[in-house]
Structures are given as C-alpha cells and as structure tokens.
Amino acid sequence: MDKKSPGCLLGRFTVVAMFLLVVGCGEKEPSVNTPEYRAAHGVVEGDVNIVEISGVLFRLPEDTDFDVYSSGVIQPGRADRLTIRLYMDRRGLRDRKNFSTEGLTWIDISRMGDPNGRKNLQIEQERLGLPTVRPSLGLVEYPLQEPVSQAEYSGSYIYVPYGEAKGSVRELCCTVAWPKDPDKVNGDCRASYYLDSGLLVQVLFPYRALVNWKSIMKAAVEEVERIEFKASARGGAL
C-alpha cells in the first residue's frame, strides 16, 4: 500500500483522538450502523482499512462494502464481528448499480462455536424427516419436522453436500416461508466454515439462490481469502 502523507496520518489520529475524548467524558457510545459507530472503530471511509477480529487481521480495500460490530467497549481497529456484503450478478461481484436482494450475499466473520463441534444435522437428529437426494444441487435435503399447520407456510431444511460437491462447507441451513407455493416461496440459507485461525465464517444468501450455492460459496471463500492478512505476509507492508 502507498505510504500515507503526514496529513492523512494526522487525520486518522484526530478522528480516533476525538472519539476517545468523547468516551472519556462519559458520552454514550454511538448507535450501530451509523457513521459515528464506524468512525469509533477507526474506519476511514474511502480508504484501505485494517480490522482485527479476535487477533486475526483483515485488510479491507476501498471497494469492500463492510460493517463492523462490537459487543463490548469499542476499540479503534478492532471488532467482534466483520460483515462483508457481496453483490453477485452475471458479471461477478460488487455490481452496485443493478442488483436485487436475490443478488446480495452476506459474509459474517467472528469468533464463535467450535471447529470440531457437532453439526446441526447431528444436533437436530430427532427432528429430521426422511432425506431426499437433490442431484441437480449436489445436496441431500433433510427436512426438520414441523407441526402440520405450520408446515403449510414455513419450513426448515438442512442440506449436506455429497460427492464432488463436498468441500469445506459442512452443511447449509435454510429457513423458508411458503415452501409449498412456487410463487410465494421465500427465505434465507446459511452456510458456514472455519478458517485455519479458528474464526467462523457464515455465508447468508436468499433461498431462491440455493441452486447457485456452489458459485456463491466459491465467491465468498475467494473474498475472505482476498482480505485475510496471512501470517506469512506480516513481514511486508500493510
């Protein structure tokens, strides 16, 4: 990254110093999803940002659409959770001029769970219905049993990759509204995997896009690899 001028460095210091002064005077911390909240985390708009999540650094180029969240005291340059938004269309990622909610994928990175822990498929074993193989998806579908009346307008499913579709993704969990009505069906799917650092990566996308789950996960993995600051590179410049 190009070296910043003293003026840029002074600007960064001023933003952080002003925030620390406000907090020191007993003012309330800013609300989430506000410019003040981002500034309190040390985010500089329109610039490259470095964010630490549980000891792991992420370098966020200017074109990255992201948010940061902290459950406790806000610290500049650190957060408990990093959320990345990918805009997927026929041309690839981050097309922000023409996109629908069906082209929006969310990536959450945080320290949560156990990389060696049980999968939802194991936890929900007693509620699972009969599995159905979906060859066109490369997935096995396991419905979670719901009351008959509720099943008419909502449903939950666990999908497990099989064959060549297997990879780092252990399972996909989908919650669906109106699953029996092709015109009204809607919902979200969540897939997750762990980084070598132990951080959990969760990928959220629309249920209607399940047919494209492989390309969505490929794009998500590539995006995380793009921004994760590898230990082997720490000898170089940020």
Image (cartoon, helix red, strand yellow):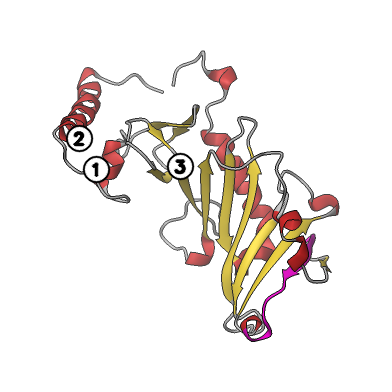
| SS at badge 1 | loop
Q: Quadrant of the C terminus?
A: top left
Q: Which residue is mark 1?
A: 29
When asked about the image quadrant of residue 206, the answer is bottom right
Within the magenta stretch, is there residue 140? yes
State the extent of the magenta-drawn residues as a range: 137-149
Percent x, y of residue 213: 67, 58
**For residue 58, side relative to residue 131 (left or right):** left
Nearer-the-camera pick, 154 or 135: 154
Disc with the residue nearer the chain's start (2 vs 1) = 2
Residue annotated with mark 3: 82
Q: Which mark is residue 23?
A: 2
Are the residues tagged 2 and 1 within 8 Å (C-beta)? yes
Q: Is residue 188 left or right of residue 142?
A: left
Query: Which residue sits at x=55%, y=59%?
Result: 89
Disc with the residue nearer the chain's start (3 vs 2)? 2
The kind of residue tagged 3 is: Leu
